[in-house]
């Protein structure tokens, strides 16, 4: 007897498991390119070791008024849009895998990194915006929160990237069988 191909709902198309992560990576590089064009190197947002008040004051002082304004009004909104995008892609990966019969825990492992990482990224960016608004007075609590959110975001983004690859494998695997 010939086995039929399993029915897959079209709510989340199969192509999304390829093009969703491609969109995230393209936007990742586009936001980096955009910040470079603005003359604002995003040092705080890529610091794996965390940062403190002295680091923030030194960096914001080096930026000067013009680059701090560009950072606040041009770079951070683009980064927030990117963060929402990869959080949404992570949520759709979870929904798409669970609709395709994968256990919810496995779907959450695949898409949860980007979902939670994107939310941490938004929180971090809002805190950095608040620090920019109150500069030259930098609150130690804001710096500690933003630093920890940065570290969590970086780990979750990396886990989400691995999870997106696993999600694509799990989505396309039945077609190869």
Image: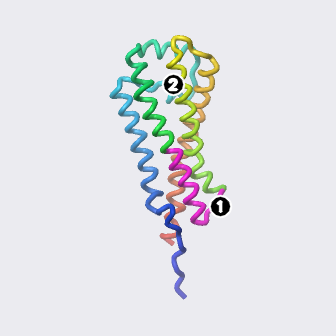
Residue at image location 50% in from the left, 58% down from the top = 168
| 48 or 15, nearer to the observer | 15
Q: Is residue 147 left or right of residue 59?
A: right
Disc number at residue 36? none
Residue behind mark 1: 103
* Residue furthest bottom in the image: 1
Say which mark, if any, is on residue 129: 2
Mark 1 secondary-structure assignment: loop
Quick check: 19 above or below 2? above
In the rendered image, the quadrant that contains the N terminus is bottom right
Q: Of callouts 1 and 2, which one flags the residue occurring earlier in the amino acid sequence?
A: 1
**Which mark's residue is nearer the viewer, 1 or 2?**
2
Residue 11, percent from left and from top: 51, 63
Q: Residue at x 54, y 35 (%)?
A: 121
Does residue 16 show up magenta in the picture?
no
Q: Which of the pair 51/141 is nearer the observer?
A: 141
Residue density around tag 1, few if under 14, some if 14–19, many if 20 or more, within 10 Å? few
Seen as rendered, the residue at the extreme left is 37
**C-alpha separation, residue under disc 1 versus residue under disc 2:** 39 Å
Q: Is residue 157 left or right of residue 63?
A: right
- Point out residue 78 in the picture as x, y percentages from the top left corner: 43, 34
The span shown in magenta is 86-104
- Identify the residue at horizontal 42%, vertical 24% (top origin): 71
């Amino acid at each position: 007897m010939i086995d039929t191909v399993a029915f897959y709902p079209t709510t989340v198309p199969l192509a999304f498991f390829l093009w969703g992560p491609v969109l995230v990576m393209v936007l990742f590089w586009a936001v980096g390119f955009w910040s470079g064009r603005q003359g604002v190197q995003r040092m705080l947002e890529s610091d794996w070791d965390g940062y403190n008040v002295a680091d923030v004051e030194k960096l914001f002082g080096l930026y000067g008024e013009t680059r701090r304004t560009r950072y606040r009004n041009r770079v951070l909104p683009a980064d927030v849009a990117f963060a929402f995008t990869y959080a949404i892609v992570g949520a759709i990966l979870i929904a798409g895998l669970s609709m395709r019969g994968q256990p919810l825990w496995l779907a959450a492992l695949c898409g949860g990194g980007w979902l939670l990482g994107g939310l941490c990224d938004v929180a971090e960016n809002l805190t950095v915006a608040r620090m920019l608004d109150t500069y030259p007075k930098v609150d130690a609590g804001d710096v500690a929160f933003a630093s920890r959110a940065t570290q969590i975001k970086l780990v979750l983004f990396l886990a989400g990237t691995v999870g997106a690859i696993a999600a694509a494998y799990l989505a396309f695997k039945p077609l190869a069988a």
